[in-house]
Image (cartoon, rainbow, N blue to C red):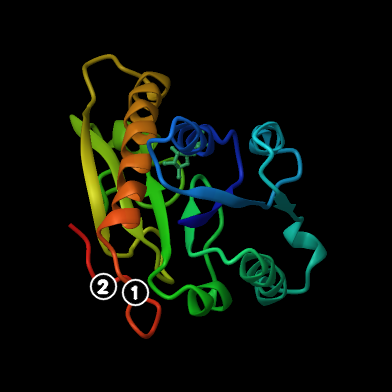
């Protein structure tokens, strides 16, 4: 399965996915990294892994439609089948949603629908919840609102700060995301509109 990873930051999830592919445990290839911050560390990781990079500065475009049209062209050139968002700090617009109907997934560091948007871990700590977690979901036009594919809980213990919880969440993400992507390589068919029709 040919995938593209979209990321804006450190890229530890990019790395986890790439590592699973390298070890032969995930039957996929990362055809492209799409990154909206030219200084993001994930770009180093992609270069290291010899994954092609499309990096861009959104401010240099007139609209989201303009840069998403360019991205869609890059994806099409490489026959990308699934878009994997991993810390891409930007809402996906109609251009990409239409180009990849039902074929865009995201990972979010909370048990959605709780704590969508930015700083989900700090939001959970401030709310005083004892359990938060990780969600993998399909992407729609909303902010962290698409249908949920998988979730895993993470406890927040007395006295733990955002960094402690983030470390536990990342550990879960790095295992869960490649595992969920693996299901797409095995249990899925596409219907006439390009949507996935079967998930275990
Ligand atoms: C992850 O916690 C993910 O859930 C969220 O952004 C973070 C990205 O981390 N969407 P990294 O760049 O993969 O290290």
Residue at the spot x=64%, y=34% of the render? 49
- Determine whether the beta carbon of the residue marked 1 sits less than 8 angstroms from the nearest atom of ligand 1: no
Tell me the element at label 2. loop
Visible in this render: residue 145? yes
Residue 47, x across and y down, in percent: 72, 36
Q: CB of residue at label 2: within 8 Å of ligand 1?
A: no
Check disc 1: other Cα within 10 Å, few if <14, some if 14-19, many if 20+: few
Q: Which mark is residue 111?
A: none
Query: Could you tell me which quadrant the C terminus lies in?
Result: bottom left
Task: Answer yes or no: is residue 129 visible.
Answer: no
Q: Which residue is mark 2?
A: 197
Q: Residue furthest top?
A: 159
Q: Which one is earlier in the sequence, the residue at label 1 or at label 2?
A: 1
Residue 167 % position (x, y) = 39, 22
Element under disc 1: loop
Viewer-closest of 167 and 98: 98
Q: As drawn, which residue projects farthest toward the front?
A: 24
Residue 66, picture quadrant: bottom right
Residue carrying label 1: 190
Question: Looking at the image, do the residues carrying marks 1 and 2 touch, with CB atoms under 8 Å apart?
Answer: yes
- Where is residue 131 drawn, in percent x and y? 19, 33
Instruction: Report the residue that reaches farthest toward the bottom.
Output: 192
Query: Quick one: 159 or 110, which is closer to the camera?
Result: 110
Q: Residue at x 56, y 57 (%)?
A: 90
Identified at 67% across, 68% down, the residue is 77
Residue 130 position, x and y percent, is: 18, 29
Q: Quadrant of residue 168?
A: top left
Instruction: Judge from the rendering whether residue 23 lies leftward or rightward of residue 46; answer left or right.
Output: left
Q: CA distance from mark 1 to mark 2?
A: 6 Å
């Amino acid at each position: 399965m040919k995938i593209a990873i979209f990321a804006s930051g450190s890229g530890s999830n990019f790395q986890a996915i790439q590592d699973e592919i390298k070890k032969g445990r995930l039957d996929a290839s990362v055809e492209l990294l799409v990154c909206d911050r030219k200084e993001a560390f994930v770009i180093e990781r992609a270069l290291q892994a010899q994954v092609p990079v499309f990096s861009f500065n959104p401010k240099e475009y007139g609209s989201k439609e303009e840069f998403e049209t360019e991205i869609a062209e890059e994806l099409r050139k490489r026959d990308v089948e699934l878009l994997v968002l991993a810390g891409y700090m930007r809402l996906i617009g109609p251009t990409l949603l239409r180009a990849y109907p039902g074929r865009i997934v995201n990972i979010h560091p909370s048990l959605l629908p709780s704590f969508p948007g930015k700083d989900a871990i700090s939001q959970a700590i401030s709310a005083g919840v004892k359990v938060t977690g990780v969600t993998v979901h399909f992407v729609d036009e909303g902010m962290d609102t698409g249908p949920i594919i998988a979730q895993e809980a993470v406890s927040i213990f007395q006295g733990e700060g955002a960094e402690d919880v983030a470390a536990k969440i990342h550990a879960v993400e790095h295992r869960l995301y490649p595992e969920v992507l693996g299901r797409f390589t095995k249990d899925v068919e596409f219907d006439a509109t390009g949507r996935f029709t079967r998930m275990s």
